[in-house]
Amino acid sequence: MAPKWRDLADKLAERIRSGEYAPGHQLPHIRDLVATGEGSKSTVHAAYKALEAEGLVTSFRGHGTVVRPPAALKRLGIDRYDKAKWRDGDEVAFIADRVASGRPHSRGDQTQTVSRIEATDTIAAALGLRPGSDVYARARLIKESGHPTHTLTSYYRPEHVEGTRLVDPAPGPAGRGGGFRVLYDAGYEIDHMREELFARPATPEEAKLLQLPSGEPVVELHRTAFTAGGSPVEFAIGVHAASRFRWTYDFAVPDSARTKGKQS
């Protein structure tokens, strides 16, 4: 005979799979299930821990236990930056990911704050500035169905963005086409990028902001965008909840020997 916590876990799992408890739905509080006779506090707690171990729910301190999305969000590697999306249309990068994943989206899923700060050594090196130089920081929090997925903070030289929508803290992308379109209209067309990724433990502040379960790591992204002449016009640092993304890269395989042969 299965233990009581297993029976309860199976019952709740069936409700999740049937759609009765949809992604983002908060499961009943432990005390409420105890009160309705589903088991003791330890039984319900064990059932919830089992559901979390099976990847069906996530427990957030102060937010209860929430049903997880059915699959990780696809995070496009290269196609998300296609100029046709933001220069000619209005599909900014995070929306391109949602479209590719077949997931709903809203421009209001992104909020931001804008401030003028002194550049750290890392920011200054990326933008070709002296440490301590003034830069604009545009910090965004991106959510899906009301739950945060990642943060992204972009840093700019003041002379590149002063007076543009990139220093406007209004919610949502910076107008049609987002930040890259603003830079394009200002005469700074993005030509190529460099991205670096690494995983690390979340800080307490990040765990709280992203509503991470205990022990979940984050993936940190460093992105530098350059013009055709090689001038850096944006440096961005993103912090992504590791379990909420699937990173996808599709690109042509280079042949440097053939390229060198054509140049000689």
Image (cartoon, grey):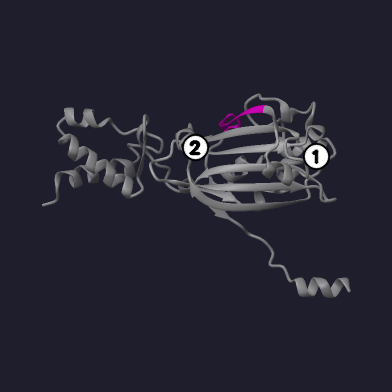
- The quarter of the rendered structure image containing the C terminus is bottom right
Q: Is residue 123 left or right of residue 50?
A: right
Residue 10 % position (x, y): 23, 46
- Magenta segment boundaries in residue numbering: 106-114
Q: Position of residue 148 (x, y in %)?
A: 50, 35
Q: Which mark is residue 206?
A: 2
- Residues packed near mark 1 inside 10 Å, few (<14), some (14 to 19) or many (20 plus): some
Seen at 21% across and 31% down, the residue is 33
Numbered mark located on residue 184 in the image: 1
Residue 174 percent location from the top left of the image: 70, 31
Q: Real-space Cα distance between discs 1 and 2? A: 32 Å
The answer to whether 25 appears left or right of 189 in the picture is left
In what element is the residue under mark 1? Answer: helix
Spot occupied by residue 146 in the image (x, y as percentages of width and height):
48, 31
Say if 197 sits above or below 164 in the image: below
Hey, which residue is sitting farthest right in the picture? 264
Image quadrant of residue 68?
Answer: top left
Identify the amino acid type marked 1.
Tyr
**Residue located at (60% from left, 47% from top):** 221
- At 63% from the left edge and 37% from the top edge, which residue is drawn? 153
Mark 2 residue element: helix
Q: Do labels 1 and 2 touch, CB within 8 Å? A: no
Q: Is residue 113 magenta?
A: yes
Decide: few, some or many residues near mark 2? Use Cα within 10 Å; few <14, some 14-19, many ≥20.
some
Sequence order check, earlier mark of 1 and 2: 1
Please state which amino acid type lies under the numbered disc 2: Glu
Query: Foreground: 29 or 102?
Result: 29
Residue under the point 43% across and 43% down: 69
1 vs 2, front mark: 2
